[in-house]
Amino acid sequence: MILEDKADLKRRFEAAFQLMHRREFLENKLLGGGIPFFIMDYPIELDGEMQKEIAAFKRRLTAEGIRVLEVDLYDLCMLVIEEYSSIEKMKRLEDRRRGDRFIKAIQSTLDVRDRITPKIKREVEAFEPQIILISGIAHIFPFLRANEILNHLNTELSDIPTLIFYPGTYHNKQLTLFDRIEDSKYYRAYPINELKIAQR
């Protein structure tokens, strides 16, 4: 589904809200046992507006009495770096190692399986959310790839409805970051605004 402008973005969030605040959605009864992972894609040009809409969307769901946990992957990565290294150390490293060498150094610190995923899991266990929102994908490139994170989260959060905000397109199961970089085939997420049930 092509997103054309800010008004279209608001319509997408309205449709998502009408679906996601329903009891059947929260209790994962709409997919016939499928993993409740959903994607809302958007063009990177609307990233600033997207952040405002995500904040308003979270407030609206919370006002309905729904426990919503937003995981901003950029903020999470900063916390992991501070825990296992430091921002200042990474800045000094960047001065010494340029290009791929620096990226690989960051990636080794931001280990998805052993550091990123467990940290998200701890947040989920502490907060016990009914809905999880995953944002910040645009801001962790090129250090982490979305499909790697999503594949790990599938195994840990398979029973909690999770909505991923993806800067690019998700079409025919293909993730294309920024509409330019093919990320991977991803078979486990449903485009939230293409579900027929969202139009009821």
Image (cartoon, helix red, strand yellow):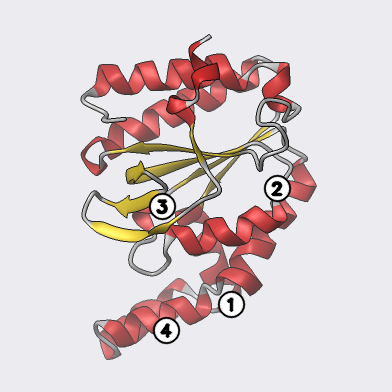
When asked about the image quadrant of residue 163, the answer is top right
For the view shown, which residue lies furthest in the top direction?
Answer: 200
Q: Mark 3 sits on what residue? A: 137
Nearer the observer: mark 4 or 2; the answer is: 2
Q: Mark 4 sits on what residue? A: 105
Whole-percent x, y for residue 105 in the image: 42, 84
When asked about the image quadrant of residue 8, the answer is top left
Neighbor class of circle 3 (other Cα within 10 Å; few <14, some 14-19, many 20+) is many
Nearer the observer: mark 4 or 1; the answer is: 4
At horizontal 35% and vertical 33% (from top left) the residue drawn is: 50
Mark identifier at residue 95 = none
Nearer the observer: mark 2 or 1; the answer is: 2
Indicate the amino acid at tag 4: Ala
Neighbor class of circle 4 (other Cα within 10 Å; few <14, some 14-19, many 20+) is some
Whole-percent x, y for residue 148 in the image: 50, 64
When asked about the image quadrant of residue 156, the answer is bottom right
Q: Mark 2 sits on what residue? A: 158
At horizontal 29% and vertical 89% (from top left) the residue drawn is: 97
Q: Mark 1 sits on what residue? A: 84
How many marks the image carries: the answer is: 4
At horizontal 51% and vertical 51% (from top left) the residue drawn is: 187
Neighbor class of circle 1 (other Cα within 10 Å; few <14, some 14-19, many 20+) is few
Nearer the observer: mark 3 or 1; the answer is: 3
Q: Are marks 4 and 2 in contact (CB under 8 Å)?
A: no
Q: Is residue 56 left or right of residue 142?
A: right
Element under disc 3? helix
Disc 4 or 1, which lies upstream in sequence? Answer: 1
Quadrant location, the N terminus: top left
Q: Vertical placement of 198 versus 72: above or below?
A: above
